[in-house]
Image (cartoon, rainbow, N blue to C red):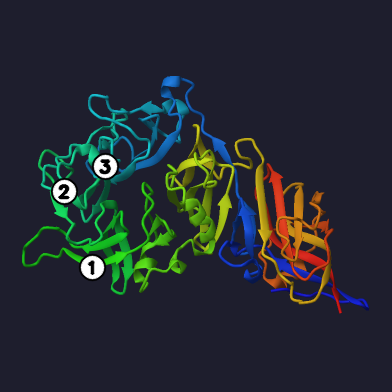
């Protein structure tokens, strides 16, 4: 891990030691003394990659019409709508693409690739639908964007290929089927999953689900109802319903997942829940218990897994169901679960949601900045799915995210729509990045005097870097003054190739003097506040004297 370069002196040995950057990511699980040296106790707006850590890119505000009547205000859901043209459709466009925004208890259609003036109000009339939310669950089925949330009228939206802008309409749902819970109204409909050509529908207060005929939308005909009160033994109601594709020994298997408010999970397979034919395939594959899902949060599919936000952290359903018992060590968020669980106490936070950003292979979980109520600031827990390393984003104050045409958008608390990973600043403000690495004895158990840190980093222009160097676990009280210095001229780093770093051509050494007490252990901290982009940190070269 560390490479001594040269030794000299009598009472002390002067050494240069190369320390890789915090590619292991954010760690709140392990004790400071036991943490791997490539992990970080703080990692804000620095993203761990395979061979370096990189400052995240900024964001820019999307211009909206100045007409107050066309102002979505605070947006609660960003719903991408993409329908591919098929044979027989009017030959107007190859694809129908737009984004539906939910804000101010209304719905808005927006084309990111076109002018902001193209924002259109598609809210159904008050006589047709009651909307009491900006937080929608949504799926696309048979070219319809289906939007549901308990307490509001379920809605459909289908873009007109001819280019006109229709309004969203009420989705006709007949729930006259008998339920043990009594009468179920259309505004009780909460979530929809598409499984093997049918719509499966959950409703507030029901321990069961409605479903349609294969290939059909709900209509005047009463929906069938599957009562699960005899299946789930802990009561409650359905919290979440989803389609889960799992890679098994015989290939890709497809299941319907039903999660209750009590943490029970039913895994179902087959085509028709009430078929009595001899060749009926519907069956329950298993009944499991997991930590309770945070109410109102969403599930996202990542590869062959389904990610849930639960009271015990962020879990991959496949990993949890394959375990013999509930063990939070199996949680996807295991490495940062101390921080996660503290925030999960704020279950009333209205913006618990997560997004899989395929273009960068990131899982982004929107969280409150702290457990204080009411929430005025949000952060994001971000997982690099390529390396399994976590970091935290600050400065966004996001309510929700949505990916469209490989670009990531988010909405802010208080209003505004933004494009993420766009530009070198946070809408004109400097990006603030801070990472504090784990403590290490740098390969020697002896007392050391730390003298200098050369930051091996890559950036195109002059950059101000602040160094916080802590000694012997005195975290929070820096033993070195924060030093600000511009980059040195390009340094010949060819002999570092043997260490295995994939170093950019713009790599430089930034020398910073360390003013710190003598000690055995040290922790390297790097902070920047900048309007630049493409900033990467590879390693730190420490100069120190070691007692003989």
Determine if residue 459 is in view. Answer: no
Q: Earlier in the sequence, mark 2 or mark 3?
A: 3
Is residue 16 placed above or below 228 in the rendered structure? below
Image side of residue 292 versus residue 336, left or right: left
Q: Which residue carries the number 1 mark? A: 285
Q: Nearer the viewer, residue 225 or 145?
A: 225
10 Å crowding of disc 3: few (<14), some (14-19), many (20+): some
Image side of residue 61 versus residue 206, left or right: right
Image side of residue 55 versus residue 223, left or right: right
Q: Earlier in the sequence, mark 1 or mark 3?
A: 3
| Residue 382, position as x, y percentages in the image | 52, 54
| Residue 402, position as x, y percentages in the image | 43, 44
Q: Which residue carries the number 2 mark? A: 212
Mark-to-mark CA distance, 1 and 3: 31 Å
Q: Which residue carries the number 3 mark? A: 143
Residue 472, quarter of the rendered image? bottom right
10 Å crowding of disc 1: few (<14), some (14-19), many (20+): few
| Placement of the C terminus among the 4 image quadrants | bottom right
Q: Earlier in the sequence, mark 1 or mark 2?
A: 2
């Amino acid at each position: 891990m560390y490479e001594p370069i040269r030794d000299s002196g009598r009472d002390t040995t002067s050494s240069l030691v190369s320390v890789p950057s915090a590619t292991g990511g954010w760690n709140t699980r392990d004790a400071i003394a036991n943490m791997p040296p490539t992990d970080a106790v703080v990692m804000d707006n620095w993203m761990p990659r395979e061979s370096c850590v990189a400052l995240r890119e900024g964001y820019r505000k999307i211009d909206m019409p100045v007409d107050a009547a066309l102002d979505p205000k605070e947006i609660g859901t960003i719903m991408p709508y993409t329908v591919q043209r098929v044979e027989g459709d009017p030959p107007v466009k190859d694809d129908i693409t737009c984004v539906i925004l939910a804000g101010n208890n209304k719905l808005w259609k927006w084309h990111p690739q076109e002018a902001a003036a193209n924002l259109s109000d598609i809210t159904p009339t008050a006589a047709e639908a009651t909307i009491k939310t900006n937080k929608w669950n949504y799926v696309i089925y048979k070219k319809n964007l289906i939007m549901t949330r308990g307490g509001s009228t379920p809605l459909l939206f289908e873009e007109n290929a001819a280019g006109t802008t229709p309004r969203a309409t009420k989705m006709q749902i007949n729930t006259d089927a008998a339920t043990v819970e009594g009468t179920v109204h259309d505004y009780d409909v909460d979530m929809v999953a598409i499984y093997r050509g049918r719509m499966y529908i959950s409703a507030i207060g029901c321990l069961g689900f409605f479903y349609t005929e294969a290939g059909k939308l709900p209509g005047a005909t009463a929906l069938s109802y599957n009562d699960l009160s005899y299946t789930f033994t802990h009561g409650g109601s359905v919290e979440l319903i989803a389609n889960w594709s799992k890679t098994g020994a015989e290939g890709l298997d497809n299941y319907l997942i039903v999660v209750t408010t009590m943490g029970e999970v039913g895994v179902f397979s087959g085509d028709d829940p009430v078929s009595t034919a001899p060749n009926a395939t519907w069956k329950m594959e298993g009944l499991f218990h997991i930590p309770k899902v945070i109410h109102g949060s969403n599930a996202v599919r990542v590869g062959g897994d389904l990610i849930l936000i639960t009271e015990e952290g962020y879990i991959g359903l496949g990993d949890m169901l394959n375990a013999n018992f509930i063990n939070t060590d199996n949680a996807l968020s295991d490495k940062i679960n101390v921080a996660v669980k503290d925030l999960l106490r704020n279950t009333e936070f209205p913006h618990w949601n997560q997004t899989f950003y395929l273009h960068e292979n990131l899982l982004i979980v929107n969280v409150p900045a702290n457990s204080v109520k009411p929430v005025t600031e949000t952060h994001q827990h971000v997982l690099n799915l390529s390396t399994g390393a976590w970091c935290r984003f600050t400065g966004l104050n996001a309510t929700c995210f949505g990916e469209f045409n490989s670009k990531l958008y988010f909405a802010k608390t208080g209003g505004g729509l933004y494009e993420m990973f766009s530009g070198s600043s946070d809408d004109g403000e400097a990006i603030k990045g801070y990472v504090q690495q784990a403590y290490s004895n740098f390969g020697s158990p002896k007392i050391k005097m730390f003298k200098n840190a050369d930051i091996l980093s890559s950036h195109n222009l002059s950059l101000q870097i602040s160094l916080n160097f802590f000694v012997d676990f005195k975290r929070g009280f820096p033993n070195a003054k924060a030093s600000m210095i511009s980059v040195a001229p390009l340094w010949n780093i060819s002999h570092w190739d043997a260490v295995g770093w994939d170093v950019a051509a713009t790599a430089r050494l930034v020398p910073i003097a360390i003013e710190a007490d003598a000690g055995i252990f040290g922790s390297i901290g790097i902070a920047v506040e900048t309007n630049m982009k493409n900033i990467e940190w590879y390693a730190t070269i420490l100069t120190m004297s070691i007692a003989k």
